[in-house]
Amino acid sequence: MAALASIAQTCSDGWFFCLRSVQMSSFSHKSFEEQVALLESRGMLFSGEQDKKKAEQKLSIISYYKLKEFARPFSKIVTVDGVRQINYQNTPFKKITVRYYQDKRLRLHLLDALEDIEVALKPK
């Protein structure tokens, strides 16, 4: 079912007006188990049931969409029966989580280095 939302604005004098209406799709929330099944159906590899359980835990901490960003370099858009779909080309889920944690550590190290530089450059 689609929801109807209005993009609106309030003027500086307090008047309210509607600019336009926008049709928004509403998607149902998928459980972590369903998200793992979706990734698997799109070609992501899981080594077994224990790996799938770990993936569910990772998805509860990181998010499906964040991990999907890190899987993008391994994905390929394919057309099946006129419908465009994502295929992760047998990429292991572990490889995606490793990339996520490497990026996280890199960001933390960069922020730490920037903090040291900032402190060193402050006038005494």
Image (cartoon, rainbow, N blue to C red):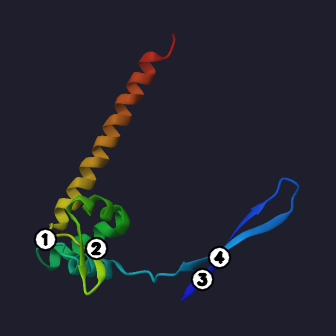
Other residues around mark 1 within 10 Å, as few (<14) / some (14–19) / many (≥20): some
Q: Position of residue 88 (x, y in %)?
A: 20, 70
The mark nearer the N terminus, 1 or 2, is: 2
Q: Amino acid at mark 2?
A: Glu
Residue occupied by mark 2 = 56
Residue occupied by mark 1 = 90
Q: Are marks 4 and 2 in contact (CB under 8 Å)?
A: no
Q: CA distance from mark 4 to mark 2?
A: 33 Å
Q: Amino acid at mark 1?
A: Asn
Residue occupied by mark 3 = 3
Residue at 31 percent of width and 63 percent of height:
67
Residue at 18 percent of width and 75 percent of height:
43
Q: Amino acid at mark 4?
A: Ala
Q: Is residue 69 left or right of residue 95?
A: right
The mark nearer the N terminus, 3 or 1, is: 3
Q: CA distance from mark 1 to mark 4?
A: 39 Å
**Would you identify the image quadrant in which residue 69 lies?**
bottom left
Residue 5 disc label: 4
Residue at 33 percent of width and 77 percent of height:
32
Q: Position of residue 37 (x, y in %)?
A: 25, 81
Q: Nearer the viewer, mark 1 or mark 2?
A: 1
Q: Are marks 4 and 3 in contact (CB under 8 Å)?
A: yes
**Would you identify the image quadrant in which residue 70 lies?**
bottom left
Up the image or down, 89 lies above or below 69; here it is below
Image quadrant in which the N terminus is located: bottom right
The mark nearer the N terminus, 3 or 2, is: 3
